[in-house]
Image (cartoon, rainbow, N blue to C red):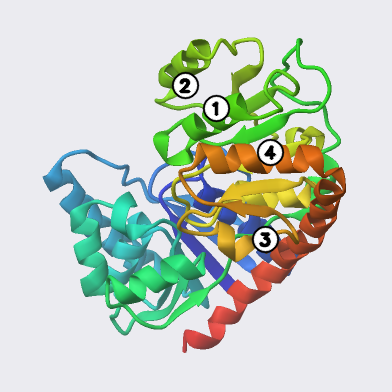
Amino acid sequence: MKIALVLQTLGKGGAERVASLLSQQFERDGHEVHILLWEKVQHYPHGGTLTVLNTPATSSLMGKLFNLLKRAWLLRQWHKAHQPDLLISLMETANIPAVLSGVPVVISVHLDPRFELASYQRLLMKWLYPLPNVKARVAVSHGIAKVLETDFGIKDWQVIANPVDLVDIAQQKTLPRTPEIPTLQGDYILGIGRLHPQKGFDLLIDAYEQSALCRVKPLVILGEGDSRADLEAQIAAHGLQNWIYLPGWANNPFPWFAGAWVFVMSSRSEGLGNTLIEAMACGCSCISADCDFGPRDIITHEVDGLLVPAESSKALSQAFDRLVMHEDLRRSLQRGAMRRAEDYDLPLIARQWANQQDLML
């Protein structure tokens, strides 16, 4: 089967990571794979052939309109020349021009469209996504699918979660941790993500300060972003500069997951929560805010993780202290997490995507 994946770039991001993993697995499964990018930005490896259609993002309104029409035309021309059996677009920057092109396509939504998209994108979604050339509509979580049905009036969504490569993770988690933190000793509490209010790291820092773990186990937050200065000021206000570390991005997060005492997702919102699945695949005990959307799709409370009310540093702190008091529960959550991660294994998820070809006719 000939499979094409369309997206903005292969830069850092959840949907980009999905495209990287799927393209490699499709190739291992014997498919002919093509990745089409609007602009040449690549952080992740890929399987198959990479084609850059060279329509980079622009900030001007007229530029956006021109890009949209040009992308649709270029994709239609590519489709006519290559005739893929399955065309998958990832995120609205690819979904909207793919639908406009008129070619048969499977679209996928990875973010909460109410808050993560511009108003013109939300309007175009309502108009375009019900069109007949959209052969299947895929959301990464049940919560996103429900919002698309109830708030946008777009029906018939499938849910296909993001994959993790369990074989690769088993190898990657044994490698040395980078970036190095020379003063870090023993295990630690771990958060990972873009330093942005959406990720709730301010809540995580407050929860740590309130917890019995404060100044007992360090807190490491891996990531980079616009909120760094605010978070550093918050850490200083608590006098915790020697206990909370912000070392930046980790190109390989899996050794960090493997060495953590607990992984915490403190987000105010998520599309699914890839890092939560990755942490579970490394055998982490996990605590997650029960935010919209994703964590409740992934975690069964007290079986393979703990869910706590969203936007509550007190609830996070209480969850920390519960695991301090009940080491048997923490160990049980680690075992449950490993079992749950098997449901997201890459070959299984890739087959779910490949099966969409049946809908293309």
Of circles 3 and 2, the one toward us is 3
Pointer 4 with pointer 1, Cβ within 8 A:
no
Q: Residue at x 76, y 11 (%)?
A: 182
The quarter holding residue 155 reads bottom left
Residue at (76% x, 42% y) in the render: 323
Give residue 75's mark.
none
User: Spatial distance from mark 4 to mark 1, Cα to Cα?
Assistant: 12 Å
For label 4, the SS is helix
- Please rate how many residues cluster around mark 1, counting C-alpha atoms within 10 Å: few if below 14, some from 14 to 19, many from 20: many
Return the residue at label 1: 205
Mark 3 — residue? Answer: 301
Q: Please, what is the three-letter code of the amino acid marked with disc 4?
A: Phe
Residue marked by disc 4: 320
Which x, y percent locates residue 285? 76, 46
Q: Amino acid at mark 3?
A: His
Q: Which mark is residue 231?
A: 2
Q: Nearer the viewer, mark 4 or mark 2?
A: 4
Q: Could you say where residue 70 lies in the image, as x and y percent from the top left?
A: 24, 56
Contact, mark 1 vs mark 3 (Cβ under 8 Å): no
Q: Nearer the viewer, mark 2 or mark 1?
A: 1
Could you give the CA–CA distance between mark 1 and mark 3, rounded to whole angstroms? 23 Å
**Of the residues shown, which amino acid type is indicated by label 2?**
Leu
Q: Nearer the viewer, mark 4 or mark 1?
A: 4
